[in-house]
Image: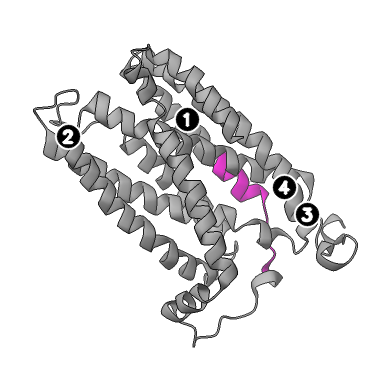
Amino acid sequence: MENNNVSLTGLSEGRIIPKKEKICFGFGILANVIITGIVGLYLTDYYINKIQIRYELFIIAQVIFLFWNALNDIFFAYIADRTKHRLGRRIPYIRYGAPLFAASFIFFWFPLPGSAPGDLNSGQTLKFIQLLIGLLFYDTMLTIVILSLVALPPEMSESTTERTSIGIYTLIFTLIGGITILVVPIIMSLGLEIFRISILILAAIATLAYLILSYGVKERFELHEKEFSEKYNILTEIKIAFKNKSFISFLIFNFCVVFTLNLSANFTPFYTTIFGLEEAWATVVLVSFYTGYV
């Protein structure tokens, strides 16, 4: 049986992941790139230049969002690791969370009635409420779905060789998702109504991709049968983590990488405004940025 095949020795020992499962995992990466890429690249520009929310309200919403973002990862990881479900402890959150994640993505781009999009002097309260609710809803679902996604490879096989081999599929589907993102400025230049229709289509594609992953990838229950000790509550585990020097080193490195990427991504669309270019030219800027990122 293919599922019982075992690679050589040492860290390479473990189940050989079928190619079909690796491709299904890649579909999850595709969905991830589509949703997070569009939000990361276009949300700031959209709310500042298209919806015209006041800067101070935008900043307040972002600050509240940052505090929520810092807290929910810890709590969800604690809950997910202790989940007992017939599908595993990662797949259920991806399968049932995907439609809600897509809904949170859609919520950003369709103005609330009475919010007067494009008018800097009207509807500011509704614009702020929509942005804040959208950020909290989106980040909650992002944590639930994507944290489960990135934690999935160790549940698929013990073999570090097999986990590493998933990387080529991750790269391929990341590039495919990136191509989708790069055409968004061209779509936006055709009008906001067409852009919003494209958002609905992309949300449906992302949901389908997550579902393909959830039905095509199998967790190995024997890899997480060991019960967690009840004496380790969430506060104890946080203390233990921050005593780990390797964890602290990675935390600093990851902060610098994420901060740089997000700062670059969020403000890339503004180059078209600063230099007086047409929106379609943002694709050229994005291709340059995306090439460097890859």
**Numbered label attached to residue 54:** 2
Q: Indicate yes or no whether the magenta region holds residue 129.
A: no
Alpha carbon separation for disc pair 1 and 3: 30 Å
Q: Residues within 10 Å of mark 4 (few under 14, many from 20)?
A: some
Q: Quadrant of the C terminus?
A: top right
Q: Could you tell me if the residues under marks 4 and 1 are in contact, i.e. CB atoms within 8 Å?
A: no
Q: Which residue is farthest right?
A: 8
Q: Position of residue 62 (x, y in %)?
A: 28, 46
- Is residue 114 shown to the viewer in this render? yes
Q: Which residue is mark 3?
A: 162
**Figure quadrant of residue 244:** bottom right
User: Tag 2 or tag 3, which sits nearer the N-term?
Assistant: 2
Numbered disc 3: secondary structure: helix
The residue positioned 58% from the left and 54% from the top of the image is 150
- Is residue 110 shown to the viewer in this render? no
Please state the extent of the stretch shown in magenta in the rendering: 209-221
Q: Is residue 253 left or right of residue 262?
A: right
Q: Could you tell me if the residues under marks 1 and 3 are in contact, i.e. CB atoms within 8 Å?
A: no
Which is in the foreground here, disc 3 or disc 2?
A: 2
Q: Which residue is mark 4?
A: 166
**Numbered label attached to residue 202:** 1
What amino acid type should be assigned to the residue bearing mark 4? Ile
Q: Could you tell me if the residues under marks 4 and 2 are in contact, i.e. CB atoms within 8 Å?
A: no
Q: Could you tell me if the residues under marks 3 and 4 are in contact, i.e. CB atoms within 8 Å?
A: yes
In this rendered view, identify the residue nearer to me: 239 or 22: 239
**Figure quadrant of residue 125:** top left
Q: Position of residue 168 (x, y in %)?
A: 73, 41
User: Tag 1 or tag 4, which sits nearer the N-term?
Assistant: 4
